[in-house]
Image (cartoon, rainbow, N blue to C red):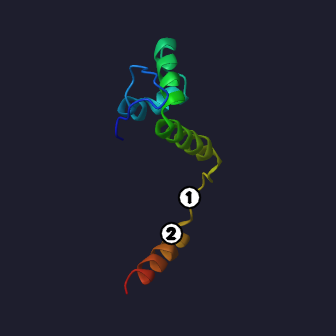
Amino acid sequence: MKDHPPTQGVDSGVTCREIADRASDYLEERLPIFTRAKIELHLASCSGCHDYVGQISLVKDSLPRLPQELPSPIKRLRLRELFVASHSH
């Protein structure tokens, strides 16, 4: 992720790289309040980071909704066979 100058003339002191590195901790509220405030200021002035954190949030919120059970060994074998057959051309 490239660092971009703030679009609204606000410098939060946080880079785009730091946003990418801390997105999960930010979303899970594991950062000190001052760091959170700096990140929120950056997100308000950087549409790229705002979109990125939104996407990470969507993935984070969607993961628990995925099925937890694994396919049976027979289904796994059949899926593997289908995959090999579709990629052997």
Crowd around label 1: few <14 · some 14–19 · many ≥20 (10 Å):
few
First of labels 1, 2 by sequence position? 1
Q: Is residue 29 left or right of residue 22?
A: right
Give the labeled residue for mark 2: 76
The kind of residue tagged 1 is Leu
Where residue 52 sits: x, y (%)? 49, 41
Horizontally, residue 13 falls left or right of residue 40, namely left
Disc 1 marks which residue?
Answer: 70
**Closest to the observer, 6 or 48:** 6
* Cα gap from disc 1 to disc 2, whole angstroms: 9 Å
Disc 1 on helix, strand or loop?
Answer: loop
At horizontal 56% and vertical 45% (from top left) the residue drawn is: 59
At numbered mark 2, what does the secondary structure look like: helix, strand or loop? helix
Dot 1 and dot 2 residues touching (CB under 8 Å) = yes
The quadrant of the image that shows the C terminus is bottom left
Residue at the (60%, 55%) spot, across then down: 69
Residue 81 is situated, as x and y percent measured from the top left of the image, at 46, 79
Q: Amino acid at mark 2?
A: Arg
